[in-house]
């Protein structure tokens, strides 16, 4: 097991994950669409934004608490959905959600998860009191969507996160070159690489290779190259529009979050259809390559929301200072996907917790160095012109 105390940053956890995982599994987590322009842009946007700190302020005590979707959280952070996370660590969703629950951070379960809606609710919601959101991929089969929504509601999930930037599957070239498929099958392309990572392989053989637990009994994917992966990619509802979102709103009585918005006018349509919150996101660069960075899109969406609903942002968050920058541009909270998944890939729940500990420490440190004692003191004048 790696010495997590020596992991000083999310990038350190990324390197540990890369060392432990076969190339195809790491590339699935780490990669993005086509030339990965948007993947890089997401980080560059945070790196471009400079801070203008206050000094001569007593920051011996810093309050990082913030409202996140109507409830108080210890910091303005939530965990984004990451599909097929079980390739990183068995039941990775469960491992990350446990770490998040113990720190009071909301966790979002993906539709193509390797842990079921019910198991996560039982193990994390019921036993740990974790805040759970369910991310819905809108498929062309209404009966599948209905069942997923009903299951999330019955299991007590706090919010439904509707992903709207998936009109077509992104062209992820690393996955194509690696011949990645679920269920995992050894082949000429990956066999040598799997054997070269015996600890990962032994763990998978012992605990079972991952599968899409929320879809396995709902879809017929036998005989398709890529199995359920190919099914999900080919069966997303490219006709999903504001009218269908409004109908979904009628069926979901709790908080409805719309994820994948990058424009102000689209934010307005989502709010008119009944959205309770907006997540500015480009899917971590995994869909449309060439889309602008989420942080760059954030101010436009915040202006369009006009305070009617909270706006969150994901894609590219790797530092506690990134959370500060997101707040300065109007986000209620930042969201992380790869950060905790790198941690889980390195060492399960302990690795995910290490990722959250790193970000928490960096957030506190950044606030102190900016002369800000609370979230209300993170004001726009801290952004350097």
Image (cartoon, grey):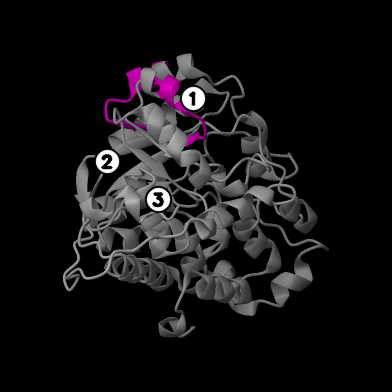
Q: Which mark is residue 69?
A: 2
Pick the residue in front: 365 or 176: 365
Q: Which residues are magenta?
A: 247-270
Which residue shows up at 40% across the image and 62% down it?
321
Query: How far separated are the C-alphas under marks 3 and 1?
Result: 20 Å
Which residue shows up at 55% across the image and 23% down it?
141
Q: Secondary structure at mark 1?
A: helix
- Residue 249 appears in which quarter of the rendering? top left
In the image, which is nearer the foreground, mark 2 or mark 1? 1
| Residue 265 part of the magenta segment | yes
296 versus 114 height, above or below: above
**Mark 1 lies on residue:** 266
Q: Give the total number of marks visible in the rendering.
A: 3
Pick the residue in front: 175 or 298: 298
Which residue shows up at 67% across the image and 61% down it?
27
Coordinates of residue 182 in the picture (x, y in percent): 64, 51
**Mark 3 lies on residue:** 326
Q: Is residue 248 left or right of residue 310?
A: right
Residue 323 can be seen in this image: yes
Q: Are marks 2 and 1 in contact (CB under 8 Å)?
A: no
| Mark 3 neighbour class, 10 Å CA radius: few under 14, some 14 to 19, many 20 or more | many
Coordinates of residue 288 in the picture (x, y in percent): 66, 39
């Amino acid at each position: 097991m790696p010495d997590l105390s020596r992991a000083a940053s999310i990038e350190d956890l990324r390197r540990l994950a890369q060392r432990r995982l076969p190339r195809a599994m790491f590339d699935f987590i780490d990669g993005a669409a086509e030339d990965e322009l948007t993947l890089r842009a997401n980080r560059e946007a945070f790196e471009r934004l400079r801070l203008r700190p206050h000094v001569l302020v007593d920051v011996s005590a810093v309050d990082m608490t913030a409202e996140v979707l109507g409830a108080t959280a210890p910091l303005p952070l939530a965990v984004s959905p990451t599909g097929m996370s079980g390739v990183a660590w068995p039941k990775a969703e469960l491992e990350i959600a446990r770490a998040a629950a113990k720190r009071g951070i909301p966790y979002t379960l993906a539709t193509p998860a390797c842990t079921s809606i019910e198991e996560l609710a039982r193990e994390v919601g019921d036993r740990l009191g974790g805040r759970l959101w369910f991310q819905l991929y809108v498929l062309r089969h209404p009966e599948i969507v209905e069942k997923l929504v009903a299951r999330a509601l019955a299991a007590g999930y706090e919010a439904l996160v509707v992903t709207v930037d998936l009109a077509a599957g992104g062209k992820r070239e690393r996955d194509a070159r690696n011949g990645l498929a679920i269920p995992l099958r050894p082949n000429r392309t990956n066999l040598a690489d799997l054997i070269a990572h015996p600890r990962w392989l032994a763990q998978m053989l012992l605990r079972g290779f991952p599968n899409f637990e929320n879809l396995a009994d709902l879809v017929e994917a036998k005989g398709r190259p890529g199995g359920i992966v190919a099914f999900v990619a080919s069966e997303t509802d490219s006709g999903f529009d504001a009218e269908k979102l409004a109908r979904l709103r009628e069926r979901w009585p709790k908080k409805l979050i719309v994820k994948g918005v990058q424009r102000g006018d689209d934010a307005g349509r989502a709010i008119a259809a009944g959205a309770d919150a907006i997540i500015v996101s480009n899917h971590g660069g995994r869909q449309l390559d060439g889309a602008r960075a989420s942080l760059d899109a954030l101010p436009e969406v915040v202006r369009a929301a006009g305070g009617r609903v909270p706006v969150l942002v994901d894609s590219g968050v790797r530092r506690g200072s990134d959370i500060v920058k997101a707040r300065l541009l109007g986000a209620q909270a930042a969201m992380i996907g790869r950060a905790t998944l790198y941690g889980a890939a390195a060492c399960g729940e302990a690795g995910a917790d290490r990722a959250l500990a790193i970000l928490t420490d960096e957030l506190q440190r950044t606030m102190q160095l900016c002369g800000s004692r609370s979230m209300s003191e993170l004001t726009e004048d801290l952004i350097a012109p």
